[in-house]
Amino acid sequence: MNNILTPGKLFSTTEKRLTEFFSMIGGLSNFSIRFLKEVFLPPYEIEQIRKHMIELGMKTLPIVGVTGFIIGLVIAMQLSPVLKRFGAEAFLPGSVGISIVRELGPVICALIFAGRVSSGIGAELGSMRVTEQIDAMEVSGVNPFRYLVVTRIFATTFILPILTVYVIFISLIGAYIAVVLVQNMTWAYYLDRVIFAVEFGDAIPGVSKTFVFGFIVGLVGSYKGYTAENGTEGVGKASTSAVVVSSLLILIFDMVLVKLTLWIWPTVK
Amino acid sequence: MDLANGEVMVEIKDLYKSFNGNTVLDGVSFNVTEAENMIVFGRSGTGKSVLLKCMIRLMEPDAGSVFIQGKDVLKLDLKELNDLRKDIGFLFQGAALYDSMSVRENLEFPLIRNFDLDRKEIDERVHFVLEAVSLLEAIDKMPSELSGGMKKRIGLARSIITKPKLMLYDEPTTGLDPITSKEISALITDLQHALKMTSIVVTHDLLCAKIIADRAIILDGGKIVKEGSINDLTTSNDPLLKNFFSDEIIETNGSLK
């Protein structure tokens, strides 16, 4: 009887969820403002940033590489018969190149990165929070926000664009393998066609937006972990919701950034 | 306040703290003098840990004031607060060792971050505190390789490595077997005497309190219900205290058996 969803219960649940959602948006905004305030203040944790960049980069390198390769391969395999239907097979390298450089490379890389890194940061900081390690740091006169959060957000912001360039390159190799299965084409010619098709207005904004995606991954993971509560259950929730929220925000910001970059660098002159 | 004569180290006045309408600290006031071992005694959930955390602003109290070394803690800015915290050691209930760092790195962390010491002096201090807690052999171990008692000892070593003037202990013997619990309590007392620190120990462990305490206060329902020496309190005919300690003694003896 208690499980029956009445309009009252539905309203109450919706109200609770909306409150939680807006409270999280407020929390993330405050966290961003605090980050921007503290990132310019000494001491600059260069060693920690370097450590996190290497750690997060190395941790994600294999999975984004494999994913990028498969995506490139599949996109080329999918596009090939479609272009053939319109007698436009010659455009295959260019089409694949533009798809990968403009959208698929950056977004797929960011989503995989979010899944791997945001959850990791959420779990790590969440665990530190519930076992009072963050309190211990604060008591010993160290600013835990700067030491734990600023360094991680900084690292994710700058490592994701590097990973994206790597993913784009690997995806293009994957696409080339799919192309040579149906067409007789040398690597040099394929690359020449890709470079011919991909313009400045495709490459730079595609990679540039991953700075924002990297910031989102670090911000959400750190926020969820840093504010975790209720013991190990809270750590699990922090880790899971970090992935969900950061993935969603990546897609929302992608929408905005695509519109923005098309306005700054229009593709049709 | 009598800090000028070197007597009062901590002064708490009318401290209030509540969570979602549930009052946890209800006008707590007490003083701790220099080199004194004060026990804050009470059952679980009576606000003992909250009191400690409010004292060093890990939590912000709703009202009241806290003076440590004559400084109004609640009015300090972040820099002043961090400077004051360098003179305070805190042993957390679960030791709160940094998981990603070895024992050596855990101990070095507060020194490297806060003090301008050369490598030789850092190594000397690390060895000194590890010898003090009899765990020199654990120097290169990770926290995950340590037992609960060892973690508490390393936590204690990390707290005293900065040579604090005031030590705060949050349930130092919780979760330990009675023998290790006695050892930790004795170690705390030895260190207190050796380093001449003032200490406030929050506990519900009567055995620990008996070993450590110079003076004790009993917290119940967010208020201080009694203050005095442990002997006075445990032998008191006050019905509340009799009831309180009879339960505690059963708990302690039960765990010893």
Image (cartoon, rainbow, N blue to C red):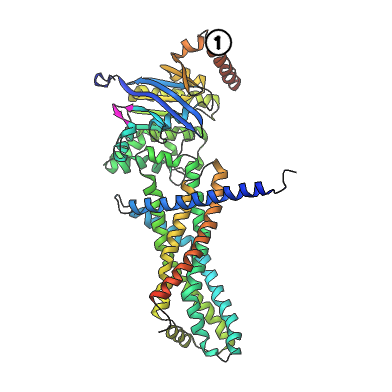
- Callout 1: residue from which chain? B
What is the total number of numbered labels drawn onto the structure image?
1
Please, is residue B67 above or below residue A145 in the view? above
Left or right, B86 with respect to B177, comes to left
Q: Quadrant of the C terminus of chain B?
A: top right
> Residue A101 location, x and y as percent?
46, 76
Left or right, A6 with respect to B145, comes to right
> Residue A19 location, x and y as percent?
53, 48
Circle 1 residue: B239
Looking at the picture, tell me which residue is in the foreground, A51 or A121: A121
How dense is the environment of label 1, judged by Cα within 10 Å: few (below 14), some, or many (20 and up)? few
Principal secondary structure, stretch drawn in magenta: strand
Looking at the picture, tell me which residue is in the foreground, B79 or B142: B79
Give the structural element (helix, strand or loop) at label 1: helix
Corner quadrant of residue A153: bottom left
Give the amino acid type for the residue marked by disc 1 in the picture. Answer: Pro
Q: Residue furthest left?
A: B4
